[in-house]
Image: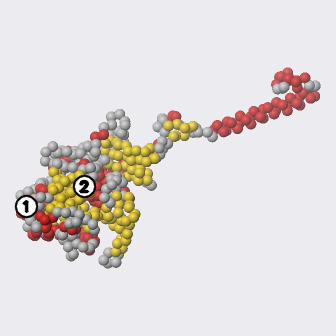
Amino acid sequence: MEEFFIKSIPFPGFREYPPHFMYPSGVILITFILVSWTSVFGFLFYAELGNTYLSPADNPPAYSGATCKDVLVSNTGSYLATRQGLWEGRSGFDYADAAYALASSSWKMDQGYYTQAMNGLRDYLIYVGQETSKSDLSRNLLYWFSFITLADPDNFANRVTLVGDPSIAFNRQNIFGTISSVHGECQLDNQITSFDKANGIISLSIPYLDYNNSSNCLAAGNPIYLGYNKFITGNNFKINLDVYSLVTALAVNLNVLPFNGLIEVKTFRSNFTFSDGSIALISRYFNPKFPGMTPIVCVVNVYCFLQVGPANYAVPFFHHIGNSTDLPQSCDCNRMTKENKADPYHQCNRFLFLTGFYFYAYNGVEPLEEFFRRNATTSHTLSYYPAFAASAFGQVSSNYSHFQDPTVREEMYHFCQTSYANCTMITFSLYDVLNPDWSISEHYYQLLTGACQDQITPSYESW
């Protein structure tokens, strides 16, 4: 033991000292070295325990743990996904099958947040799918056009939508425009209806002189309320309908799109005083899915309108032609058989639409206020009947003379009559005759059986 101790003294010179000096000196040196080594090792060891190492967030869990930290990648861009669970860029992905679109801007998320967000999204899609299983094609298309959920509740830039685009779905082989009122249809030989697909604008071009010489046209309203200005429009004037604005306003009014899915243009916010002295907040909004759309005018958190001409506000409508081209018979999901619903060529699944708006050719908002207070919530359903009578189908129907009967017309237009003025309706018929098409997106997603069925919810396995 003594020999081991002497050999352990770190400096050989100390080993030559007399025993009474060598032993205490050796103990001091050995103790100093042991304490120093232990201190340095312990410091480095505990410092190392506090370190974390970066690993890709998509690595298997075996690569992460107490000493690993995920790298959150910043995602910016637009990404498509199919109902089969395939994201854009994955093997097997097909653009024509893309049903969902994710828009992101500098969005970071870990695995837990991503899982939570995707589960919440699927729950919302299930709810929407249940609604579409009991609704006709026109209402279901509003979901495809307007569905939005924010992946990041505080950032509109990070959102999930469905791929529906009204400029695609409304691009039919035939487009027919009509002005009508309780007094009859204003149908002129030289009027022209067109659709600017690139900008989503349906236009009805009307020769002013012909309009001014038609009693039915004049009964529908003074053309200045439709945008006519002899110094600007000349001998023809146009009635324009922004389909993006139409579907957005209507989706809000029918509770398809919540107000928090819109972006407010706060510059236009103002108070509006009703005739009874009550005050409502008025503002303009747009849908972030449709940049460049004409803003819609809304009574905040209540109802939305389109703006027509320089100062008039209009109520939008959008209907499927129904189960008949001869009579206004809406598609009833309870009466459609399983075979009907599965048949793309069944009339309720074909893209045959009536859309447009109605307004009051009146210098003031009193008629619109009266209408709004009375039956704004039920007006959309009731607008189907006069829209059908004014449509391309109603004009050639075997029941045309019935539609022109004054008593019948009073009944059809009663829903929008006020003590100030009757409404004027602008109806556009959109339909295919040959080679029907079911495209609803820029990548031509085909909504073959969109009536009364859930074509939105993904399966649990694919999700």
Q: Nearer the viewer, mark 1 or mark 2?
A: 2
Residue 451 in the image, given as x and y percentages of width and height: 22, 50
- Image quarter (top left, top right, bottom left or bottom right) of the N terminus: top right
Under tag 2, what secondary structure?
strand
> Taking the image as drawn, is residue 205 in sight?
yes
> Taking the image as drawn, is residue 409 in sight?
no
Q: Quadrant of residue 438?
A: top left
Residue 351 in the image, given as x and y percentages of width and height: 19, 50
Q: Which mark is residue 95?
A: none
Q: On the picture, is 19 further left or further right than 363?
A: right
Q: Is residue 177 above or below residue 23?
A: below
Q: On the picture, is 247 further left or further right than 122?
A: left
Q: CA distance from mark 1 to mark 2?
A: 29 Å
User: Total label count?
Assistant: 2
Badge 2 density bin: few <14, some 14–19, many ≥20, Cα 10 Å: some
Tag 1–tag 2 contact (CB < 8 Å): no
Residue 341 in the image, given as x and y percentages of width and height: 20, 47
Residue shown at the point (33%, 34%) measured from the top left: 92
Badge 1 density bin: few <14, some 14–19, many ≥20, Cα 10 Å: some
What amino acid is found at the position of numbered circle 2 in the picture? Ile
Q: Quadrant of residue 139?
A: bottom left
Residue shown at the point (92%, 29%) measured from the top left: 21
Compare marks 1 and 2 and give the one earlier in the sequence.
2
What amino acid is found at the position of numbered circle 1 in the picture? Tyr
Under tag 1, what secondary structure?
helix
Residue shown at the point (9%, 65%) measured from the top left: 404
For disc 2, the marked residue is 201
Residue shown at the point (14%, 58%) measured from the top left: 191
Q: Is residue 279 above or below residue 101?
A: below
Residue sitting nearer the eye, 97 or 457:
97
For disc 1, the marked residue is 400
